[in-house]
Image (cartoon, grey):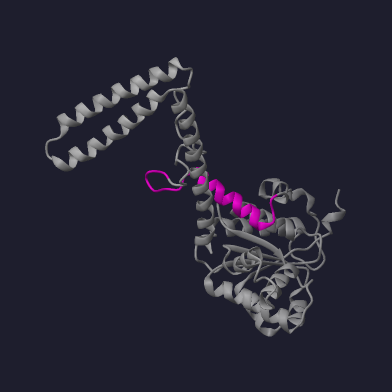
Amino acid sequence: MYKKFIKDILKEYEKKRDRAIGDQEKRKKEVYSKVPEIKEIDKTITNTGLLISKELLKNPDNYEDKLKEIKDKMEVLKRKKAILMTENNIPLEYLDINYTCNQCKDTGFLENGKKCNCLKQSLINKSYKMSNLNHVLEKENFHSFDISIFSPEPFEGEKLTPRENIMEISSICEGFVHNFNIDNEENLLFYGTTGLGKTFMCNCIAKALLDKGNIVIYQTAFKILEILGDRKFGKDKKNKLNASEYDLLFDADLLIIDDLGTELTNSFTNTEIFNIVNSRLIKGKKTIISTNLSPMEIANTYTDRIFSRIFSKFTALKFYGPDLRWES
């Protein structure tokens, strides 16, 4: 899937190059029509440039003198062209190719083979768009995380206060991000009642990884099962977007399944949830599950296979404390 992801972006780069070259050709025609002599000079410059390659092939061991002669001729032609353009009020750079990025000339890669910064940013932007989190992550991220809204008071039956607990959870989540590209089979399960910061923490992780160029897909369990159902029952055959959404559930670097337990539960949903979780585990792809269900409720709602897979392969983190939605 990542190769297809890159391929789609590089197609966009190809279109940029084609547009830039097309625009240059239009400007050339305009200038050649106005000053035909510039067209003749450009032809001569092109032919003179070919002489360099020919001389190298004819006499590879001793072509320095001829090369200097050709280069001197080229410089004379370029100066003559510059004078003509100046005399006709044409900017000297008017016939250049105006790439969107002059560093990589709209190829996405530098001369040393490394990704250009513009390509890295394109990957990040596309990942954001596909993650369904474009706007929310501007507000919900590790930088805006406010520990003070969590209660410092003891909470019924728990060893840590809600604030101490969320500090520990936050530390684990930051470690998850830091070690994300290490093959450590780390997955996370966030559980606890509503209004305790589970979704916020998912968003913090999503933004941190998206900013690093990872492919993150964030969907509710209900939406995931809708995508899986469309695929299974043939509703997405004519819809490439749905097909792409389906593939990304299995191939994205990180899949965040939000609100597990709010979907309709039956044999189909049990089978499909197990399939997606198990397939990602086998591929070494990481997953975060967020749910309002307790471990006992998960056991009672889903099959033993799902319960066993989640609690043996995921780090379970319990969110507790007063409902933060009521905090001012």
Q: Is residue 252 above or below residue 96?
A: below
The image shows residue 214 at horizontal and vertical percentages of 56, 56
Q: Is residue 232 above or below residue 34?
A: below
The image shows residue 266 at horizontal and vertical percentages of 76, 82
Q: Residue at x 16, y 32 (%)?
A: 64
Where residue 1 sits, quadrant-wise, is bottom right
Q: Residue at x 48, y 43 (%)?
A: 106
Residue 157 visible at all: yes
Magenta includes 23? no
Instruction: Tell me: 323 left or right of 313.
Output: right
Which region is colored magenta?
Answer: 110-134
Magenta includes 126? yes
- The front one of 267 and 76 is 76
- The front one of 146 and 21 is 21
Instruction: Specify the principal SS of the magenta part.
Output: helix
Residue 98 visible at all: no
The image shows residue 192 at horizontal and vertical percentages of 77, 67
Q: Residue at x 55, y 46 (%)?
A: 121
